[in-house]
Image (cartoon, rainbow, N blue to C red):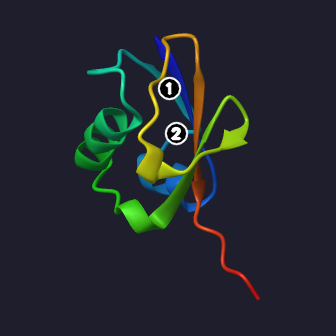
Amino acid sequence: MLTIHYFGEIADKTGRTSEKLQPQGKQVSALLEALQEKYALQHDEFQVAVNHQLIDLSADMEVEETDEIALLSAFAGG
């Protein structure tokens, strides 16, 4: 099972700081789609890290069941 960690406003919206999920598919996009549907998240609200590395969502990488995924509130520059 994947371990999903939630930080900042995303943790507030989900009501939890982490959970374990069985992935629906191997692609990050499938996982994010399921989480967006479950928690009514918008894709521009967060960044994603896999195993402590921020990822480019356009690459739609594959994840393994042992991976740790983090959803971090979007950062504002300035």
Q: Secondary structure at mark 2?
A: loop
At 43% from the left and 52% from the top, the residue drawn is 58
Nearer the camera: disc 2 or disc 1: 1
Q: Secondary structure at mark 1?
A: strand
Q: Are marks 2 and 1 in contact (CB under 8 Å)?
A: yes
At 36% from the left and 21% from the top, the residue drawn is 26
Res 16 label: 2
Q: Say above or below: 29 vs 39.
A: above
Q: Say above or below: 27 vs 67.
A: below
Q: Nearer the viewer, residue 3 or 62?
A: 62
| Type of the residue with mark 2 | Arg
| Type of the residue with mark 1 | Glu
Q: Is residue 45 left or right of residue 73?
A: left
At 26% from the left and 21% from the top, the residue drawn is 24
In three-dimensional space, the C-alpha distance between marks 2 and 1, rounded to whole angstroms, equals 8 Å
Res 19 label: 1
Q: Position of residue 31 (x, y in %)?
A: 35, 33
Q: Position of residue 78 (x, y in %)?
A: 76, 89
Q: Is residue 72 left or right of residue 44?
A: right
Q: Is residue 69 left or right of residue 42?
A: right
